[in-house]
Amino acid sequence: MIHLATFADLRTAKAVSDYLQIQQIKNDISPDDKGWSLFIIEESQLEQAQQELEAFLNNPYDQKYLDASWIRNQNARIYPKANKQNKLTHQIWRDTGVTTRIVAVTVVIIFVLQIFGFHPWIYQYLGFPVTLASLEFLELYRLVTPALMHGSIVHLLFNVFWWIWLGGKLELEKGGTFIVNLFIASALAAHLCQYSIENASFLGLSGVVYGLLGYAWIASKLGKLKLYIPDGVFIMMLLWLVIGFAGVLPIPMANWAHLGGMLAGVAWAWFEKPTNPV
């Protein structure tokens, strides 16, 4: 998305946005510390959008802008569900980077393949090896790939939500290379920890998610991350970890993987050189 303009009030931003939408110029409004920013979704439409913005600034009370807002309002009433779905899609697209999207889509595809009977093949080629001694050089990727597999739809949705919500924000601030490196480091730490203490029977993105949370928690405290996340999120993370180790839930949990991933994220934040101090 490309920034077009920032407006002091939402009404003005909405007027421009509605008219651009009527002209088939896809856009989105996002609040920031300066007001309400308008973004153009497609770069190919930027020049036309700039021309329409200039026309609006020259004559903001033109009837066509009022008409556009009225039409958009009527459409929202007629197709409320479609508008909500489009808004959610645009928000996810806006708040994530390419790497975050690729991982999320890959995880979903692998889960669908598991459902349709490909799980023996997936477990054989993506699962963690029964023993490290049996792992060949060309199979080293299997130390990481269990993070892409999930055992249930609830497990999948929970992890994908956290990956998109937090991983996307971290990628936008720190970059795609960073999120790939943190993914690999957290996955390795989580999987090797779980394997060393218990066994090789585990799967899921949870260890990586804990790595992201651990990193974000410490990096924000050390002034190495601009992203703000409420302390309640981290408290919930720790409580869930304690509940898992307490064994009070009727579901199996890879608790050592969660702990290993979190510690990897914490260590990464601690030793990371501050490049963008807050």
Image (cartoon, rainbow, N blue to C red):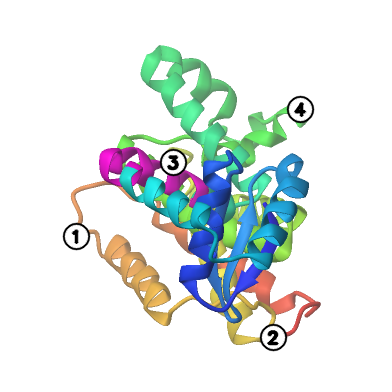
The stretch drawn in magenta includes residue 81: yes
The stretch drawn in magenta includes residue 133: no
Amino acid type for the residue under numbered disc 1: Val
**Of helix, strand and loop, which mostly describes the magenta segment?**
helix
Which residue does the image show at 64% across and 47% down from the upper left? 41
Residue 278 — which label? Answer: 2
Residue 248 — which label? Answer: 1
As displayed, is residue 75 above or below residue 180?
above
- Magenta span: 75-91
Residue ID for mark 3: 202
Observer-side mark, 2 or 3, equals 2
- Which of 42/190 is in front? 42
- Which of 85/162 is in front? 85
Toward the top, the furthest residue is: 117
Q: Quadrant of residue 113?
A: top left
Label whose residue precedes the other's in the sequence (4 or 3):
4
Q: Position of residue 148 (x, y in %)?
A: 53, 37
Q: Secondary structure at mark 4?
A: helix
Residue ID for mark 4: 138
User: 10 Å neighbourhood of mark 1: few (<14), some, or many (≥20)?
Assistant: few
Q: Secondary structure at mark 3?
A: loop
Q: Quadrant of residue 234?
A: bottom left
Amino acid type for the residue under numbered disc 4: Leu
Marks 3 and 1, how far apart in space? Answer: 19 Å
The reply to whether callout 2 and callout 4 are in contact (CB within 8 Å) is no
